[in-house]
Image (spheres, rainbow, N blue to C red):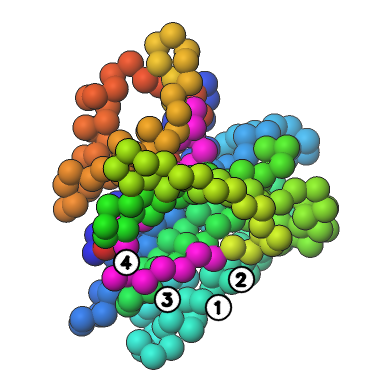
Amino acid sequence: MNSDSYFCIGSSHKYCEDYAIHGDLSDNDKTLSYALISDGCSSSLVSKGIRNPINVDIGNRLIALEIKNEISSIFKNFNDDVREKWINIFLQNLNNTNLYEVLLKNKIDDQIFDCTVLLSIVLGDKIYIRILGDGVIAVKNKSGILDILNLEYDNNAPMYYSYLMNKVRLDKFEEVSKLKITRTSISDSIELKEEYECKTNDIIIKYNTDEISSISLFSDGVKTFRDKEGKEINYIEIVKQLTDFKNKNGEFVKKQLNIFNRNNKELLHSDDFSFSAIII
């Protein structure tokens, strides 16, 4: 297995509010790989009502690094028999008491964590994808079929990590917004679409490694690419190009982006963009 990630600022932003990390852990013949993206909400009101996108930029990095530390701790401190159990428990809860203590100690508004999180973990023969917010997920199976999941919420108001820390905000959110998933399955020249409305915001998708060749996670910035005339480019086409990995070793995400940029020199994305992936 191999993982890699990349993030960059959008053409319309002054600060980058996306973040992405990845990692590969090993213990003798046991391995774990993870990929994560987090997208901060630039419209969140933080620090005495003053809009400050730098705060959610800090927030999504703290979230990502705490998740990284938790995954590493589970892999290091538990043997193979119970790692899977603890990874499942962690993914179901995801909330981190260390971050909550940081808020309390420093009297920081929890809106600093108004950030989406998409996380994939590959452990043994199991693949887990935890959805907390919007974005796009691309799963390619070993027969070459590409499943692209577009994650959207009512009123463009996604689930945020901060809601896990604040039941009042979570309850208000769940009253008005639900996750909607549009699945596009692509095989050769055939595209099939299905739409789902989820009854819960606690979504974990599971696969077996013998079925899948790669998992890619994108922030919603992948849907903001435009040509020099300002015409919007369908995100399906962007994702297809970005997941057609030519090199599966080393920094394969960055290498694929280099190919994409050479072939699409005139395209720009207005929103911040993050991309994290695992090759099985």
Q: Which mark is residue 73?
A: 3
C-alpha distance separating marks 3 and 2: 16 Å
Circle 4 sits on which residue? 211
Circle 2 sits on which residue? 93
Tag in front: 3 or 4: 4
Q: Residue at x 71, y 60 (%)?
A: 199
Q: Quadrant of residue 162?
A: bottom right
Q: Nearer the viewer, residue 270 or 54?
A: 270
Q: Nearer the viewer, residue 139 or 275?
A: 139
Q: Residue at x 52, y 21 (%)?
A: 12
Q: Earlier in the sequence, mark 4 or mark 2?
A: 2
Circle 1 sits on which residue? 89
Tag in front: 4 or 1: 4
* Neighbours of disc 4 within 10 Å: few (<14), some (14-19), many (20+): some
Tag in front: 3 or 2: 2
Q: Looking at the figure, which quarter contains the N terminus? A: bottom left
Q: Is residue 239 part of the magenta span, yes or no? A: no
Asked if labels 1 and 3 touch by Cβ distance under 8 angstroms, the answer is no
C-alpha distance separating marks 4 and 1: 24 Å
SS at badge 3: helix
What amino acid type should be assigned to the residue bearing mark 3? Ser
Q: Quadrant of residue 124?
A: bottom left
Magenta residues, as a range?
204-224
Asked if labels 2 and 1 touch by Cβ distance under 8 angstroms, the answer is yes
C-alpha distance separating marks 3 and 4: 28 Å
